[in-house]
Amino acid sequence: DAGITQSPRHKVTETGTPVTLRCHQTENHRYMYWYRQDPGHGLRLIHYSYGVKDTDKGEVSDGYSVSRSKTEDFLLTLESATSSQTSVYFCAISGEPSNTIYFGEGSWLTVV
Amino acid sequence: KNQVEQSPQSLIILEGKNCTLQCNYTVSPFSNLRWYKQDTGRGPVSLTIMTFSENTKSNGRYTATLDADTKQSSLHITASQLSDSASYICVVGKTGANNLFFGTGTRLTVIP
């Protein structure tokens, strides 16, 4: 298994509160990604990073921000959580985009 | 429009039987096609990745085929086991980090 750790694995939060999900890798991969997975949708890219402090938006980036201050850590922040952000969030890593992408175990977020 | 369609949505087979899952895509320009297995409550795990020049790739009892001309791929599972029960996700890539298109998956259930 690729060395990817997501935390927290499960969280329930209230609407309007900030939430930060953390992804930690031990593989020294250059690329890190945050996806969300919802019923009826394929995995959708939120943000990705191609190096320390280098990030870019994905398909569904509104309401989310990210930061990468170290190669091994990629943080996803919901500044003010909404019920539509209830989802399963997956962190992923790859050496290059064309290489195999390895996924973490997921973080289940419920916004009430 | 870049789309990935998988069929069937769900499938139930008897242990020991073979099955084939389908993936049709309209993604262009094509770079690669990937199949992932996702167990319930877990992150997706890579099975195969194929580029334009490859038309078959195997990983144990899993064999993926690609017809880039008709934009179709299939995943064949031989001698199914109970542990094959999972969702199988087809992912088609264009060049770049923000250019993966995910299908919604086929839910396979293997029964004794």
Image (spheres, rainbow, N blue to C red):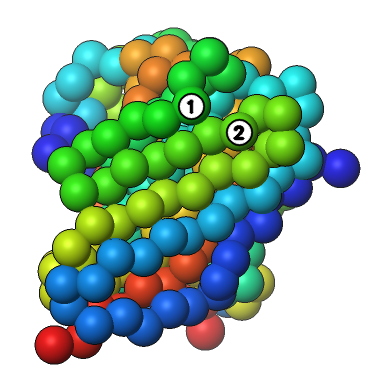
At label 2, which amino acid type do we have? Asp
Determine crowd level at label 1: few under 14, some 14-19, many 20+ residues with C-alpha closer than 10 A.
few
- Look at mark 1 in the image and give the residue it sits on: B55
Going by the image, does A1 lie left or right of A15? left
- Indicate the quadrant containing the N terminus of chain A: top left, top right, bottom left or bottom right: top left
Q: Secondary structure at mark 1?
A: loop
Marks 2 and 1 sit apart, C-alpha to C-alpha, by: 6 Å
Residue A83: give its label.
none
Q: Are marks 2 and 1 on the same chain?
A: yes
Q: Nearer the viewer, residue B17 or B24?
A: B17
Q: Nearer the viewer, residue B38 or B50?
A: B50
Determine crowd level at label 2: few under 14, some 14-19, many 20+ residues with C-alpha closer than 10 A.
some
- Mark 1 chain: B
- Mark 2 chain: B
Q: Residue at x 35, y 30 (%)?
A: B57
Q: In the rendered view, tell whether residue B91 sits above or below residue A56.
A: below
Can residue A6 be seen in the rendering of this structure? no
Percent coordinates x, y for residue B20 in the rendering: 42, 60
User: Upstream in the sequence, badge 2 or badge 1?
Assistant: 1
Q: In the rendered view, tell whether residue A100 sits above or below residue B6.
A: above
Going by the image, does B83 lie left or right of B26? left
Instruction: Tell me whether circle 2 and circle 1 mark residues in contact (CB < 8 Å).
Output: yes
Q: Residue at x 23, y 38 (%)?
A: B59
Can residue A2 be seen in the rendering of this structure? yes
At label 1, which amino acid type do we have? Asn
- Look at mark 2 in the image and give the residue it sits on: B67
Percent coordinates x, y for residue A10 in the rendering: 29, 69
Q: Residue at x 36, y 65 (%)?
A: B19
Q: In the rendered view, tell whether residue A61 sits above or below residue B85.
A: above
